Amino acid sequence: MSEVAHKKASILVLISGNGSNLQALIDSSKSGKIPGNITHVVSSSSKAYGLERAANSNIPTTVHELKTYYKGIPKENKEERAIARSKFNQDLVELITTKIKPDLIVCAGWMLILSADFLKPLSEAHIPIINLHPALPGYFEGTHAIERSWEAGQRGEVTKGGCMIHYVIEEVDMGEPLVVKEIDVIKGETVEKWEERIHALEHNAIVEGTIEVIKCLNEKQK
Ligand code: GAR
């Protein structure tokens, strides 16, 4: 046999909200387009609709909320909050590396910053992690990127927008891009329409990025 047979990759998806990108991954995994199975979903919010999407496809879920860790610590107490945040990261990475043990992690609308105390143990465990950023490389890092790119477009400061899938590094939304998709700014377009067009791009980009990482993993196994 010349072809190397690969087992299907196990994918952990991190979400915080609606989960339309999770749905794109679920659908592409079910259709066989992605050579992998979504084996677990972790949500940073118990209210995320994505949890229902996962449950509808019988995918196990875990809710891992920062507010549980911040409970009783006043906002002004920066030191205690930093310790709590670090514990949140450590518990999450421990859950991933000792219990879920995925082949790769996809952040699909995960809204929390992942710092070194989370990323280093993952890298040591050789678990790649990618993220979806709703803007082009080098643009609008951080939250509300869709609204900010729309405003910049309408002001004439940019002529294009889009989304990218990139490897996660400590610098927020700045890792090496794996997939980049662009759309042109349309003068006078509503932010709702702009958002709709970005989401349509994202649903393809996240699937393509995930397939790319699985290909890389399979290459390494050869
Ligand atoms: C997507 O637009 C994604 O790009 C964005 O959140 C949305 C999640 O939608 N992610 C970020 O802004 C990450 N900083 P979804 O829950 O429907 O997949």
Image (cartoon, rainbow, N blue to C red):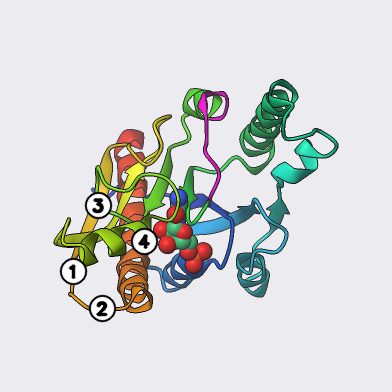
> In which quadrant will I find the C terminus?
top left
The residues tagged by marks 1 and 3 sit, at their Cα atoms, a distance apart of 13 Å
Residue bearing the label numbered 3: 136
Instruction: Tell me the amino acid under the disc marked 1.
Output: Val
- Along the line of sight, which residue is nearer the eye, 192 or 207? 192
- Along the line of sight, which residue is nearer the eye, 161 or 33? 161
Whether residue 89 can be seen here: yes
What is the number of the mark on residue 185?
Answer: 1
Q: Earlier in the sequence, mark 3 or mark 2?
A: 3
Image depth: mark 2 or mark 4 in front: 2
Q: Is residue 33 above or below residue 168?
A: below
Task: State the residue at coordinates (43%, 37%).
Answer: 128
Rendered location of residue 173, percent (x, y): 37, 42
Q: Residues within 10 Å of mark 4 (few under 14, many from 20)?
A: many
Residue bearing the label numbered 4: 146
Residue bearing the label numbered 2: 189
Give the residue at the far right of this rendering: 72
Task: State the residue at coordinates (71%, 23%).
Answer: 83
| Residue interval drawn in magenta | 111-118
Instruction: Tell me the amino acid under the disc marked 3.
Output: Leu
Badge 4 element: helix
